[in-house]
Image: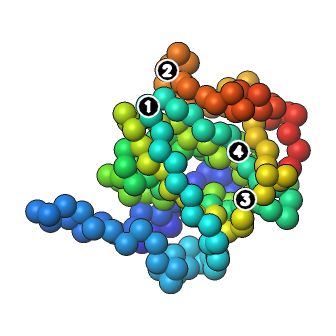
Amino acid sequence: MQRIDTPLKDAFYITPPQFQDARGIFSETYNQGDFEQATGLSINFVQDNQSISKYGVLRGLHFQSGAHAQAKLVRVSMGRVLDVIVDLRPTSPSYGQYYSLELSAENGRQLYVPKGFAHGFITLSPEATFCYKCDAYYCKESEGGIIYNDATLGIDWHLNHEDILVSEKDQLLPTFLEVTV
């Protein structure tokens, strides 16, 4: 396992080894010791979440703030997504910047999303199963978000607007300039 830094401060991805033979593929998707050795981070993940989404479904951009802020380790166990993170930490050199990375069952990449980041993804395959580990429990009172088509961020979601399906709740999220973390 190797840590590959992104242009955003403190965000990186890893690719655990995959072993393939005539039967298929085996991968140990998470091993705390290997994660700590590869990344230098000691994190206690306390919650695992999973979503299944159809083509064009866009979930996000979401975050937890304050005492309930979450770091996440995200991956895809079936299908393909474009994963997007936005640095919301005003003192960070990458504040207000976004980074996107394709995650798929085939490439095995896992993206580490630090606390203080917004996160979202869009499904690029007919269906995708998205899995994520969180280091803090979800707290409804601490949830926040940014509208996916924010003009300031200018995120390229890699699909035509008419192919994107966003929940009613996510369509009502504020802009980047309206958010304070």
Question: In the image, is residue 101 above or below residue 172?
Answer: below
| Residue found at the very far left of the displayed protein | 22
Residue receiving disc 2: 163
**Counting residues from the N terminus, which is met first, the one under dot 3 or under dot 2?**
3
- Residue receiving disc 4: 62
In this figure, which residue is indicated by the disc labeled 1?
A: 55
* Disc 1 residue crowd, few under 14, some 14–19, many 20+, Cα 10 Å: some
Considering every residue shown, the one lying at the far top of the view is 162
**Label 4, residues with CA under 10 Å away: few <14, some 14-19, many ≥20:** many
Measure the alpha-carbon separation of dots 4 and 2: 21 Å
Marks 2/1 in contact by CB < 8 Å: the verdict is yes
In space, the residues marked 1 and 4 are separated at their CA atoms by 19 Å
Rendered location of residue 107, percent (x, y): 35, 53
Q: From the viewer's perspective, is the residue at label 3 or at label 2 nearer?
A: 3
**Circle 2 Cα neighbour tier, 10 Å, few/some/many (<14 / 14–19 / ≥20):** few
CB within 8 Å, label 4 to label 3:
no
Determine whether the residue tagged by mark 1 lies in a helix, strand or loop. loop
Q: Which amino acid type is shown beneath numbered disc 3?
A: Tyr
Disc 3 is placed on an element classified as loop
Please name which of the two marks, 1 or 3, marks the residue nearer to the observer: 3
